[in-house]
Amino acid sequence: MGSHQENWFYRQLSESNDRGAAWRVIGNQVVFSRVNISSWFGTFIDPFNTDQWDGYQSNRNRYVEICGSCDDVKTRNL
């Protein structure tokens, strides 16, 4: 996401309680957690898939921080 989209997403997530949202479900088509793929390909040169969230660590860290900072949000799974 670009910065404008990312800010919109975080704002919507933070303000969802004001709209009466009981659930906050975020769909994602790629693996969110880090996955060491060196065992798949037998190389340690680039053990992480940079096409997934591994390539966007700062974005992932911001997402985790936002989920933890929302007063009413109790993140059970990431």
Image (spheres, rainbow, N blue to C red):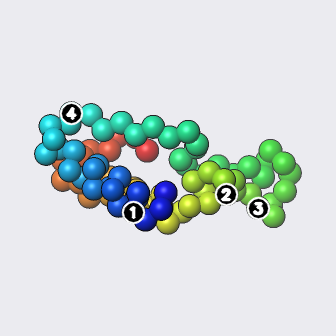
The residue that disc 3 covers is 46
Q: Earlier in the sequence, mark 1 or mark 2?
A: 1
How far apart, in angstroms, are the residues tagged by discs 4 and 3?
40 Å
Secondary structure at badge 4 equals loop
Residue pictured at 21% horizontal, 33% vertical: 22
* Numbered badge on residue 4: 1
Is residue 20 rendered to the left or right of residue 1?
left
Q: Amino acid at mark 4?
A: Ala
Q: Earlier in the sequence, mark 1 or mark 4?
A: 1
The residue that disc 4 covers is 22
Q: Which quarter shows the C terminus?
A: top left
* Numbered badge on residue 50: 2
Residue pictured at 32% horizontal, 44% vertical: 75
Mark in the foreground, 1 or 4 = 1
Give neighbour class at mark 4: few <14, some 14-19, many 20+ (Cα, 10 Å).
few
Q: Amino acid at mark 2?
A: Thr
Is residue 32 at all visible to an observer of this figure? Answer: yes
Mark in the foreground, 3 or 1 = 1
7 relative to 67, above or below:
below
Q: Amino acid at mark 3?
A: Asp
Quarter of the image where one finds residue 56: bottom right
Q: Pointer 3 and pointer 2: residues touching (CB < 8 Å)?
A: yes
